[in-house]
Image (cartoon, grey):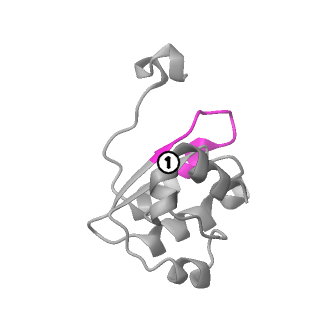
Amino acid sequence: GLCKSNLEMNVPEMWASGTAAARPLAWGSAEDAAALSPPFDTLVGSDVVYREALFRPLIKSLEMLSDAHTTVVLAFKPRGLNEEKFLHLIRRKFQVVREVDASEIPAAFA
């Protein structure tokens, strides 16, 4: 699939050695999460906040894949999709250490 192609293209040495892998994860699925052998040290997501109906399943997956020692880094550009609700929900389950304001992001990444 697309994830495997991205891994093979962007980190070919990790892909070839088996240190990087792509696995399915339906947000909110305990079965999919358990198959990944959590908890992880770090979870990274980019542009994963795009539909309000998926906020709770996303947060549930983050909970299932993490423990008290996991660092979760999420990046998303506010698009008027009720991101404030997402931030409210995630603060109930995770300690939010820092929100980065758009003005802090270099233009090349904005």
Please identify the residue farthest to the left as the structure is shown.
69
Name the residue at 33% across, 72% down.
67
Name the residue at 71% across, 54% down.
2
SS for dot 1 = loop
Residue placed under numbered mark 1 in the picture: 11
Name the residue at 67% across, 33% down.
79
Judge whether residue 62 can be spotted in this image: yes
Left or right: residue 18 versus residue 39 is right
Which quadrant of the rendered structure holds the N terminus?
bottom right
x and y percent of residue 85 in the render?
58, 49
Circle count: 1
Please say whether residue 77 is one of the residues in the magenta stretch: yes
Q: In the image, what residue type sits under mark 1?
A: Val
Judge whether residue 48 can be spotted in this image: no
The crowd level at tag 1 (other Cα within 10 Å; few <14, some 14-19, many 20+) is: few
Question: Magenta region: which residues?
Answer: 74-87
Name the residue at 50% across, 48% down.
11
x and y percent of residue 80 in the render?
68, 34
Please name whichever residue, 79 or 76, is drawn nearer the observer in this view of the structure: 76
x and y percent of residue 88 in the render?
50, 52
Whether residue 23 is situated above or below residue 45 in the rendered picture:
below
